[in-house]
Image: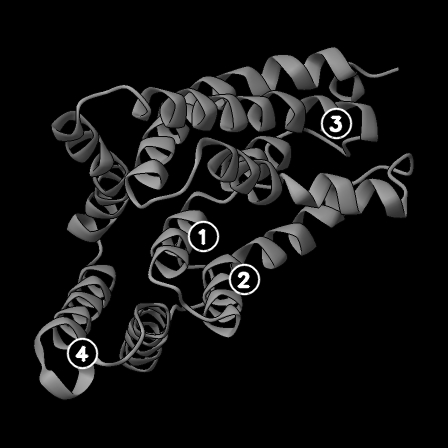
Amino acid sequence: MREENTFVKGIKDGLPICFGYLSVAFAFGIFALSHGLTVLEAVLMSMTNVTSAGQLAAVPIIATGGTLIELAVAQLVINLRYALMSVSLSQKLGGSVRLLDRFLISFVNTDEVFAVASSQEGSVGRRYLYGLILTPFLGWSAGTLLGAAAGEFLPEIVISALGIAIYGMFIAIVLPKAKGHRPTACCVLIAVALSCAFTYIPGLKSVPSGFSVIICAVVAAAIMAILAPVGEGEDHA
């Protein structure tokens, strides 16, 4: 059996992702608790979603009593990239990966898991992939539990401060790319401007927060897709 198809090799490759998820999920746990979710609700959300951006968008919708349609559409827009990544990764799957395996593996096919699996030489088998997704899943779930549990006894001022940590994480992800790629920076600025419009303009303030997030993301992306389409072979990650 080739080394890249062993369960232990998958575990080893997934450990760095696991440790990275611990800190991010800890911040999410604090964030969820600060919006009124219980520890159990926060942990169940992480165990059944494994999507930081989707969960971050879902919490305010749930906290403000948004509709299921808002929640579903927001998740579809935000997490659509995972479907595309799964299609791409399917080209590297070995013959040992069955249909049921594909469903289970795709559940934890996050950006980092996809990057690691795609970088392997040759095809990857089911044992390796199960090992690769196991530790990140445990890290994401455990981090959420620790963060939400900490929020139960930490002072309110500390919870409020830690609650913005997850926003800082997304800023750290976006800024480096925006600094070196003008279309990305313009897309971010358009989304920010639209978000401010939905926050401060009287006629738009009545739009539910879930739908405003969807509109900002789709409109900003559509405008930049028209004005600055990605050329063939161009790096657009």
The image quarter containing residue 135 is top right
Type of the residue with mark 2: Leu
Q: x, y percentage for residue 226?
A: 33, 82
| C-alpha span from label 4 to label 3 | 45 Å
SS state under label 1: helix
Name the residue furthest bottom.
203
Cβ atoms at labels 1 and 4 below 8 Å apart: no
Instruction: Please state if 47 lies on the left or on the right of 224 as rendered.
Output: right
Type of the residue with mark 3: Tyr
Cβ atoms at labels 1 and 2 below 8 Å apart: no
Nearer-N-terminus badge (3/1): 1
| C-alpha span from label 3 to label 1 | 23 Å
Q: Is residue 19 above or below residue 71?
A: above
Instruction: Please state if 34 lies on the left or on the right of 20 as rendered.
Output: left
Q: Nearer the viewer, mark 4 or mark 3?
A: 4
Q: Residues within 10 Å of mark 4 (few under 14, many from 20)?
A: some
SS state under label 4: helix
The residue to which callout 3 is attached is: 130
Type of the residue with mark 4: Lys
Nearer-N-terminus badge (1/4): 1
Nearer-N-terminus badge (4/3): 3
Type of the residue with mark 1: Gly
Nearer-N-terminus badge (2/3): 2
Q: Nearer the viewer, mark 3 or mark 1?
A: 1
Q: x, y percentage for residue 91?
A: 74, 49
The residue to which callout 4 is attached is: 205
Q: Is residue 202 above or below residue 32?
A: below
What's the mark number on residue 54?
Answer: 1
SS state under label 3: helix
| C-alpha span from label 1 to label 4 | 22 Å
The residue to which callout 2 is attached is: 80
